[in-house]
Image (cartoon, rainbow, N blue to C red):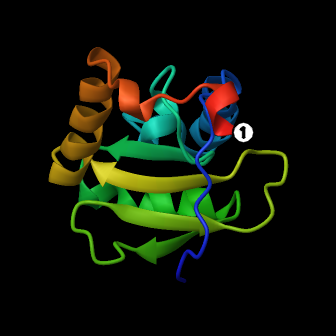
Amino acid sequence: MITKHVVVLPYDKHWARDFCEIKSEIQEALDQLALAIEHVGSTSVHGLSAKPIIDIDVVIKDYSMLDAVISALERIDYHHEGNLGIAGREAFKYEGKTHLRKHHLYVCPRDSEELKRHIAFREYLRSHEVPHLRMSAKSAV
């Protein structure tokens, strides 16, 4: 699928709450299979303008857990798509879920370079002011 139009919006304080709602549903399905569920990507950075799509990494011990995770997520209508060409990250799609904000869901082993990259990027943005990436509601109009 080719994206033809990208919308970037000023930071929305509801993104953190939206992540928590999605996380709660996933955590309930995965129980002890997930070591952590991380809010990554630009919506996880307070004050940062972003595409209004929540990026989520489910952290698992290692790939030996993947089949059980796939089964648990399938029970709540997430479908495994494979790594989509990016090693260390398994993508999941969904249909419906209109009660949740649009999101991207990935499952990563805890030693995954892709997970480390996502966390490092998030933490860098959280700890460094990047003024040209922050947009006020007034400038978005």
Q: Would residue 110 be visible to someone looking at this image?
A: no
Whole-percent x, y for residue 102 in the image = 68, 52
Q: Looking at the picture, tell me which residue is in the foreground, 70 or 137.
A: 137
The residue lying at 42 percent from left, 44 percent from top is 58
Give the percent coordinates (x, y) of residue 14: 70, 25
Quadrant where the C terminus sits is: top right
For the question of whether residue 58 can be seen, the reply is: yes
Query: How far from the left and from the top, in percent, is residue 92?
Result: 52, 65
Number of disc labels: 1
Report which residue position mark 1 lands on: 141
Q: Residues within 10 Å of mark 1 (few under 14, many from 20)?
A: few
The reply, left or right, for residue 55 in relation to residue 63 is right
Q: Residue at x 24, y 26 (%)?
A: 124
Q: Secondary structure at mark 1?
A: loop
Residue type, label 1: Val
Q: Residue at x 57, y 56 (%)?
A: 72
